[in-house]
Amino acid sequence: MIQLAGLTKRYGNFTAVAGMDLAVRRGELFGLLGPNGAGKTTTLRMIAGILQPTAGTITIGGVSLAGDPVAAKSRLGFIPDRPFIYEKLTGTEFLRFVAGLYGQGGDEIDRRGEELLALFDLMDWKDELVESYSHGMRQKLIIASAFVHRPEVIVVDEPMVGLDPKAARLLKDLFRAYVDRGNTIVMSTHTLEVAETLCDRIAIVQNGRIAAMGTMSELRSSTGYDSGLEDIFLRLTGEKAGRTALEVLSV
Ligand SMILES: Nc1ncnc2c1ncn2[C@@H]1O[C@H](COP(=O)(O)OP(=O)(O)OP(=O)(O)O)[C@@H](O)[C@H]1O
Ligand SMILES: [Mg+2]
């Protein structure tokens, strides 16, 4: 459903994403893990069509993103890590606005919007301006907005940040139900528990490259680390601390 071939992003001399090849299947929930600065957000923004690759190709459902951006993007919803919402719109208006960007509207969209707002406990706030929303409420509204036009593919950058435990659980259930219906999600996360329990396959990204990829059991056997994801992650990404925290505090 999502195909990356030689995907590369350079900023001047610095290579943020270095020739990434990846195929995410229809119906799959695919997780990107990796240290800060590994290139996850850059990759997701290129897939979502809001950042131009330096080289390489992206195909969404067989449609080239560069060749036919409108057709490719119409199948896609994006949940950014630092979302922008117009403060002077209400929750309901924001969902209508996003659906409108995809050329959709009317009673069906309003009904679906209300179902999503209800799911995330936002019905009491639907007619209030976004400027009065808390951080988590904004996050829930952004998540709702990605689902409202029924995309086949959702690209999500660290969706759990700022959500309370109930909302985080809801999101996991929503993602799982959504892919079980044949849709596709690619997400980044730092929450290893989420990756381990929710994702069908995982890629560990480091320095703009995929260091390891597969199901949990494939990762265990390909890395030879017969342990939890935290150990596999830390050993693969070579997180060798210079000074320990204790040493630094006693300087
Ligand atoms: N606009 C930019 N100009 C220059 N360098 C950039 C730009 N955007 C990102 N980078 C660099 O590209 C690298 C990858 O950044 P990216 O945001 O993709 O990392 P990430 O894996 O999402 O990290 P995190 O886990 O902290 O969110 C970083 O070194 C970052 O400094
Ligand atoms: Mg990021």
Image (cartoon, rainbow, N blue to C red):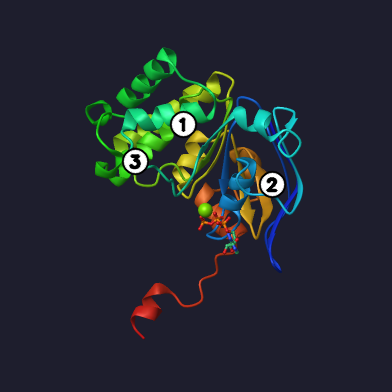
Query: Which amino acid type is shown beneath numbered disc 2?
Result: Ser
Q: Which residue is mark 2?
A: 222
Looking at mark 3, is its residue's CB closer than 8 Å to ligand 2?
no
Q: Which residue is mark 1?
A: 98
Residue at 54% across / 35% down in the picture?
A: 199
**Residue furthest top as drawn:** 107
- Label 2 SS: helix
**Viewer-nearest residue: 129 or 113:** 129
Query: Which amino acid type is shown beneath numbered disc 1?
Result: Val
Give the total of numbered labels. Answer: 3
Q: Residues within 10 Å of mark 2 (few under 14, many from 20)?
A: few
Q: Nearer the viewer, mark 2 or mark 1?
A: 1
**On screen, 12 above or below 197?**
below
Across and down, in percent, residue 82 comes to 44, 49
- Residue 138: which disc? 3
Answer yes or no: is residue 164 visible: no
Image quadrant occupied by the C terminus: bottom left
- Label 1 SS: helix
Looking at mark 2, is its residue's CB closer than 8 Å to ligand 1?
no
**Distance CA(mark 2)–CA(mark 1):** 42 Å
Across and down, in percent, residue 30 comes to 59, 37
Q: Which is nearer the N-term, disc 3 or disc 2?
A: 3
Residue 144, by quadrant, is top left
